[in-house]
Image: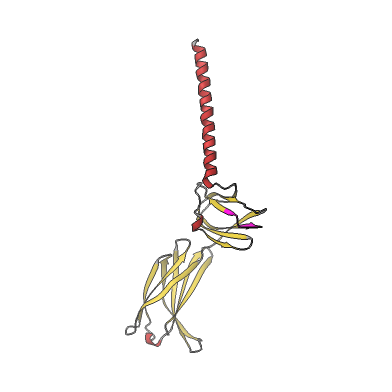
Amino acid sequence: MDIKTAKHRLYLVLVLAVIFIGLGTAIFLSASRVDNHSLPESREIFTLYDTYNMTVIVTFDKEPPTIQFIAPDSGLVDMKDIRYKLDNNFIQYFLPNTIPGIWQMAYDPLSNTEISSHYSVYMAHIFINDFSVEIVDVKNNGILLSFEVSSDKPDEFRYELYAVFMEFDNGIVDERLLIQGYGALNELTALAVFVDEYNVESGFMLRLSASVQHGQAAIVDTAWLDLR
């Protein structure tokens, strides 16, 4: 065998090796993608250019399909941690803090003949929890209280606490702003307030208002405590 023929055969062997390696890699990637969610169908649901809270509504005609959301980095969303609302012919999913990129939905249609998906941006709701008074200092007109404002998205909230004085028929006689400020969502906030103008022993209502600003709109929740 001359040198030219040997070089030609070596070249063919290298080309075939590259082809087989390429095919093997393609098959492996394809298999990995299928095994990634193991559901028979998938579709793109939206493309984001910034981080948003997204809601996805999946409509069906017979039974709730099996759903798996896939992030732009190919990570699978843990469906056990996702809030959802189930109705007769739709499921509404709430996806907080979705990262930029192309989002996909893998699904098993089961017995359904029609499945459609729709999406929109939503503002995270806030809820005042565990609003309670720890200490009432009658002598010094002082009150120690605590509360937590929860939300899907960690952020800062603004609060205002009012003393509301009422008649026996629950008509409001007067209200005074006791304290206002900022706190962190999903963390306990403790406050010490004083009601100098009135005797704490005579009793009143406490009204707590918490809000989070989203552009021109604000999400607000209010809670009451009866200290009468």
Quick one: which residue is furthest to the front in this view?
111
Where is residue 138 shown, x and y percent of the image? 34, 84
Residue 125: percent from the left, percent from the top? Answer: 51, 65
Q: Quadrant of the C terminus?
A: bottom left
The relative height of residue 29 versus residue 201 in the rendered view (above or below) is above
Residue nearest the viewer, comparing 10 with 97: 10
What color scheme is it?
A: secondary structure
The magenta segment is 58-66
In the rendered image, the vertical position of residue 107 relative to residue 178, given as above or below: above
Image: 219 above or below 205: above
Q: Residue at x 45, y 66 (%)?
A: 150
Residue at horizontal 54 percent and vertical 32 percent from the top? 23
Quadrant of residue 89 within the rendered picture: bottom right
Instruction: Choose between 181 and 91: the one closer to the eye.
Output: 91
- Name the residue rendered at 55%, 46% in the picture: 38
Name the residue furthest top. Answer: 2
Whole-percent x and y of residue 207? Answer: 46, 78
Q: Is residue 207 left or right of residue 86?
A: left
| Percent coordinates x, y for residue 120 in the rendering | 59, 58
**Residue 75 drawn in magenta:** no
140 sits to left or right of 103: left
Against 223, is 12 above or below?
above
Residue 179: image quadrant is bottom left
